[in-house]
Amino acid sequence: MVIVEKINIADIPLLHIVNHSHRDKKTPVVIFVHGFTSAKENNLHYAYYLAEKGIRVVLPEALDHGERSKDYNTKELSFRFWKIVINEIAEVNTIKEYFEVNDLIDQGRIGLAGTSMGGITTLGALTQYDWIKAAVSLMGSPCYTTLLKGQLSVLKQSGVKIPLSNDEIDEQLSLLEPFDLSLHTEKLQNRPLLFWHGERDDMVPFAPTYQFYKDIIPMYEKTPERLKFIVDPLAGHKVSREGALALTEWFERYL
């Protein structure tokens, strides 16, 4: 029986999903981060698939989302996007430490994954934490600085006034650089990494992420099975059932 618990860690609301027979045992763990304007509950199907395989799953609520929502409209929230991402990267470490202290993690078997903003968070976290054994990005992007420039360009073209000066934009780009995996590919350390992305995605551009994947293929020359990119030529910004099952199989294999 798979159980779902609602708990709070350091003011971070989250759902804890685990097979009842494994509840108090050391298990592999996957922290799964939701997307922009989404909420932790929207990813319960991923958690169920993983829990059935004996993997403990944690679904945290991102800053300003779900239970942590404030009175921001979508446009206001979009200007807080990178603050939310960087905060989430810090919080996944807090969550990991909680489960370590409570002796519920099988050391060396920790995975990180997410959809959209959660996939972006996942790829950024790989630059910071060597405890991530395997990762899955669903519709994410590792190219933080390129993505920010693209976001600003789209806003300008649509006539939206950007509440940042050029100096503030440069400062934001500098703050993102340490988390930009495309600038720090050495941080990958040959860790298993799976991408899923729809070619028709109009939210997180497909091309830069696919180019990144092609660029790092030589780094996995000795272990090509540890790197995979699933392209859905018909999908937009929505993960298919194939993507969900591929994520489950990836973590079952590498955790």
Image: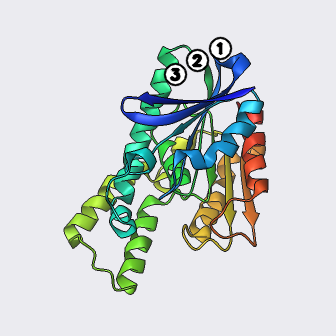
Question: Spatial distance from mark 2 to mark 1, Cα to Cα?
Answer: 6 Å
Left or right: residue 153 compared with residue 206: left
Q: Which mark is residue 99?
A: 3
Question: Spatial distance from mark 1 to mark 3, Cα to Cα?
Answer: 11 Å
Q: Nearer the viewer, residue 244 or 68?
A: 68
Q: Which residue is mark 2?
A: 104
Left or right: residue 18 compared with residue 103: right
Quarter of the rendering containing residue 11: top left
Where disc 3 sits, the SS reads helix
Q: Which callout, 1 or 3, points at the residue further toward the start of the chain?
A: 1
Vertical placement of residue 102 versus 253, above or below: above
Density class for disc 2 (Cα within 10 Å; few <14, some 14-19, many ≥20) is: some
Residue, x 49% and y 49% (percent of image)? 121
Residue, x 73% and y 17% (percent of image)? 21
Locate residue 119, reporting x and y percent: 56, 52
Q: Are marks 2 and 1 in contact (CB under 8 Å)?
A: yes
